[in-house]
C-alpha cells in the first residue's frame, strides 16, 4: 500500500497551504495512494535541544507528538511539506518540525528517511520570488542533505487571505496533477 503524508505548517485551517496540500493528496489518492494529513499546530512538538540522544540510543528523549510523526513518515513513501512564507522563512511550526529531523542524521535512523520522495508547497503574499527563495533553499539544502528526493514544488505568489488560492485555478490544477504524477 502506497501512503502519502501531508504536513501543514500553517496554523490557518482552510488556508492556502491547506488547500494546496489537499489538492496534491487528492491527486495522489486518485492513483491509489492512501492519504494522511496533519496540522502541526494541532500537535505538541517540542524544540530540539541538541542533546543528540538520538545518536546514542536511536530515539528522541522528548516524549511528544513527534513520535507519531516519526511513525507516519516511516510508513509513507511521499511527504508533502507545506508552509507559507513567514518573514522570509518557514513558519516556526515548520522550522521546529524540521529541527527534529536531527533524529534522521545518525546512521541507525538515516534509512528511515533516505530515498523518500518530498514535495514542497509554499504560498506567500508578495509577487517577487525573492521573498520565497530563502524558504526554497531551506528545504532543498535540508532535504537533500537527508538524502530525500524532492519530486515537486508548488510555489504560489500573491496570495494573502485565507483560501485565496481557490481563485487561482491554475495552481489548484497544478497541485492536483503533481499529486497524480506521483508513483
Ligand atoms: C507572521 C506572518 C509573516 C508573513 N511574512 C510574509 C513574508 O515575509 N512575505 C510574504 O510574501 N508573505 C508573508 N506573509 C503572508 C503569508 O505568507 C500569506 O498570507 C500566505 O498566503 C498564508 O498562507 P496560509 O493561508 O496557508 O496561512 C506573512 C504572514 C504572517 C501571518
Image: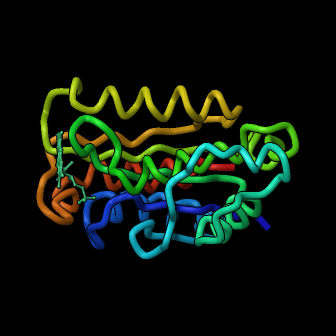
| Whole-percent x, y for residue 118 in the image | 59, 44
| Whole-percent x, y for residue 89 in the image | 31, 38
Vertical side of 128 occupied by 16: above or below: below
Vertical side of 169 occupied by 117: above or below: above
Side of 167 relative to 79 (left or right): left
Specify the color scheme: rainbow
Q: Residue at x 59, y 35 (%)?
A: 143
User: Tag count in the figure?
Assistant: 0
Q: Residue at x 85, y 53 (%)?
A: 57
Vertical side of 38 occupied by 122: above or below: above
Side of 126 relative to 30 (left or right): left
- Camera-side residue: 62 or 129? 62
- Camera-side residue: 45 or 34? 45
| Whole-percent x, y for residue 84 in the image | 29, 49
Residue 157 occupies quadrant? top left
Q: Which residue is drawn at 33% across and 55% down?
A: 172
| Whole-percent x, y for residue 179 in the image | 53, 54
- Camera-side residue: 50 or 35? 50
Side of 131 relative to 32 (left or right): left
- For the N terminus, the image quarter is bottom right
Vertical side of 77 occupied by 111: above or below: above
- Camera-side residue: 95 or 183? 95
Q: Which residue is drawn at 49% across and 51% down?
A: 81
Side of 180 relative to 175 (left or right): right
Amino acid at each position: 500500500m502506497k501512503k502519502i503524508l501531508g504536513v501543514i505548517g500553517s496554523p490557518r485551517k482552510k488556508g492556502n497551504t491547506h488547500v494546496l496540500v489537499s489538492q496534491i493528496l487528492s491527486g495522489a489518492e486518485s492513483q491509489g495512494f492512501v492519504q494522511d494529513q496533519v496540522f502541526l499546530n494541532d500537535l505538541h512538538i517540542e524544540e530540539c535541544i541538541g542533546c543528540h540522544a538520538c545518536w546514542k540510543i536511536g530515539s528522541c528523549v522528548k516524549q511528544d507528538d513527534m513520535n507519531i510523526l516519526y511513525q507516519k513518515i516511516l510508513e509513507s513513501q511521499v511527504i508533502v511539506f507545506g508552509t507559507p512564507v513567514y518573514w522570509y522563512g518557514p513558519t516556526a511550526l515548520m522550522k521546529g518540525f524540521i529541527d527534529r529531523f536531527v533524529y534522521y542524521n545518525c546512521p541507525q535512523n538515516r534509512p528511515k528517511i533516505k530515498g523518500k520522495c518530498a514535495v514542497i508547497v509554499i504560498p506567500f503574499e508578495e509577487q517577487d520570488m525573492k521573498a520565497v527563495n530563502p524558504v526554497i533553499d531551506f528545504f532543498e539544502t535540508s532535504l537533500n542533505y537527508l538524502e530525500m528526493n524532492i519530486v515537486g514544488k508548488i510555489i504560489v505568489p500573491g496570495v494573502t487571505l485565507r483560501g485565496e488560492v481557490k481563485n487561482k485555478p491554475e495552481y489548484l490544477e497544478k497541485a492536483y496533477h503533481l499529486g497524480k504524477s506521483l508513483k
